[in-house]
Image (cartoon, helix red, strand yellow):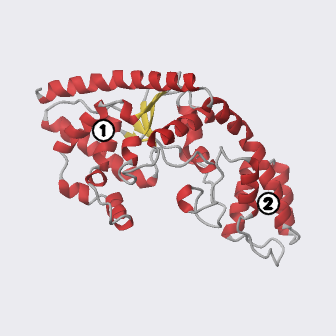
Amino acid sequence: METVVSGIRPTGNLHLGNYFGALRNFISMQNEHNCYFFIADYHSLTTHPTPADLNGNVRQILVEYLAAGLDPEKATLYVQSDVPEVAELYLFLNMNAYIGELERCTSFKDKIRQQPENVNAGLLTYPTLMAADILIHRATKVPVGKDQEQHLEMTRTFGNRFNRLYNVEYFPEPQAFNFGNELVKIPGLNGSGKMGKSEGEGNAIYFADEPEAIRKKVMKAVTDAGPTEPNQAKPEAIQNIFQLMKVVSAPETFSFFDQQYNACSIRYGDMKKQLAQDMINYTEPFRERIKAISSDEDFLLKVRKMGKEKAQENAARTIREIRKIIGF
């Protein structure tokens, strides 16, 4: 059985893009692999060093991912800062990480352009903290997006370097978990790009959104004046609306509006009203579970305690063995 590790940032609420992008696959993976899913509150400090309510954000993310289907009985679901062994391994890996290779990291270069007023050591050593998250459980598979592939390569570098320096075969080489064609790209409502909080206000449909908020967002979605020729190609913004409808609406609903478009008789107002209602219906079960779980403080404490104990048991074993290898 493969050991899988993946992190979840405690910033922003769960939206349709998160769910179809990877979360559905996490839910499937927990039935087939030894999975460790953690809320990366340490990582969040690299870009938000003074969060207004870090504990509240962590709690909300825990609630929403439980509501979406992550099962603490099947997977180890924990908070990064609840496992101090991660920070200790981060320290050990930093001792054998070179300043040049960290400065060449693409994400570091991007961040110093985006936040020149906050170029901190945490940004520079982000790859070693990510490596610690993975190597602490001696993971063999890591679900990563394109923007994280370089970090995974660096994790292999750090693990192999440790093995070589201490003449051991301790850390395995974690490989990217390839979802193949299972990932569904969910576009945003602003006419281009992907769904996400970083793409602009009103771009994402969150599972915690109330029906009226969903209607307002969908009705403001970008459209055009409509087709002028039968069966003409849809511009990107219109393709986005149809893609969203394909995900949440019945096939016959999608087909109806597609035929209307091809016949140059589509009324975008009617389409968006239907899409809004279908989104409300689709997200309703998630919204109700979020409310129920959020009101059950005892259950949340139990889940967090159980995740901490399971993750820490494995992490403590790794640290004991590493300390012995190093010579402590």
Q: Check contact, mark 2 vs mark 1: CB within 8 A.
A: no
Q: What element carries label 2?
A: helix
Q: In which quarter of the view is residue 42 placed?
A: top left
Q: Residue at x 35, y 67 (%)?
A: 113
Image-based side of 100 in relation to 255, left or right = left
For the N terminus, which image quadrant? top left
The image shows residue 48 at horizontal and vertical percentages of 40, 52
For the C terminus, which image quadrant? top left
Q: Can residue 159 be seen in this view?
A: yes
- Tell me which numbered mark, 2 or 1, is placed earlier along the sequence: 1
Q: In which quarter of the view is residue 123 placed?
A: bottom left
The amino acid beneath tag 2 is Lys
Q: Residue at x 39, y 26 (%)?
A: 311
Q: Which of 168 and 246 is in front in this view?
A: 246
Q: In which quarter of the view is residue 255 placed?
A: bottom right
Q: Is residue 154 visible?
A: no
The image shows residue 248 at horizontal and vertical percentages of 74, 48
Q: Which residue is drawn at 61% across and 32% down?
A: 294
Which numbered dot is residue 272?
Answer: 2
Q: Which residue is drawn at 53% across and 21% down?
A: 73
The answer for how far apart the CA atoms under marks 2 and 1 are is: 45 Å
Q: Nearer the viewer, residue 128 or 66?
A: 66
**In the rendered image, the vertical position of residue 264 relative to residue 57, given as above or below:** below
The image shows residue 197 at horizontal and vertical percentages of 56, 56
Q: Name the residue under label 1.
A: 132
**In the rendered image, the vertical position of residue 158 relative to residue 199, given as above or below:** above
Q: Is mark 1 on a helix, strand or loop?
A: helix
In the rendered image, the residue lying farthest to the left is 327
Q: Nearer the viewer, residue 278 or 1?
A: 278
Image-based side of 135 in relation to 196, left or right = left
Q: Residues within 10 Å of mark 2 (few under 14, many from 20)?
A: many
